[in-house]
Amino acid sequence: MSDAHTEIFCCDALRAVAVELPDPAAPTIYVSDSGVTMVVVGLLQTEDGLGYLDQAIQHCPFCGTKLQDAEAIAEKVSH
Ligand SMILES: [Zn+2]
């Protein structure tokens, strides 16, 4: 995890629950390879292993600080 990634945490609560990568995937908050703060919202056990659905978050769920806006997320995840 680079310095740029750690700087996005606005409060200790968010930093405490965030992990570099969900392993194994679990309902949690993490920063994706593209630098977008994501929260895992659902898990699905498949024949190929554990799959998960994640969602970018725009505001900290603990203190309400705006972390990233939709345009910034779209830029980071554009392929
Ligand atoms: Zn916060």
Image: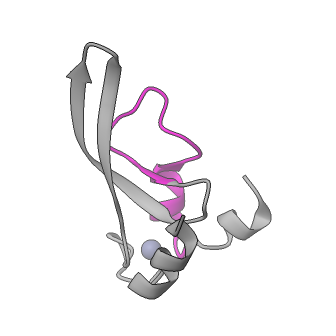
Image quarter where the C terminus lies is bottom right
Q: Quadrant of residue 71?
A: bottom left
Magenta segment: does it hold 55? no
Q: Which residue is at 60% across, 61% downward?
A: 34
- Taking depth in this image into account, of 10 and 39 the one nearest to the observer is 39
Q: In which quarter of the image is ligand 1?
A: bottom left
- Above or below residue 58? Residue 44 is above
- Taking depth in this image into account, of 74 and 79 the one nearest to the observer is 79
Numbered circles on residues, count: 0
Q: Which residue is at 55% across, 55% downward?
A: 32
Horizontal side of residue 39 vs 7, given as left or right: left
Magenta segment: does it hold 28? yes
Q: In which quarter of the image is residue 63?
A: bottom left
- Above or below residue 64? Residue 47 is above
Q: Position of residue 20 (x, y in %)?
A: 59, 45
Judged from this view, the residue extending furthest toward the top is 47
- Above or below residue 2? Residue 62 is below
User: Where are the magenta residues, as a range?
Assistant: 9-30
- Taking depth in this image into account, of 78 and 16 the one nearest to the observer is 78
User: Does the rendering let one see residue 17?
Assistant: yes
User: Does the rendering let one see residue 65?
Assistant: no
Q: Which residue is at 54% across, 76% downward?
A: 10
- Above or below residue 50? Residue 56 is below
Q: Position of residue 42 (x, y in %)?
A: 22, 42
Q: Which residue is at 51% across, 83% downward?
A: 72
Q: In which quarter of the image is residue 15?
A: bottom right
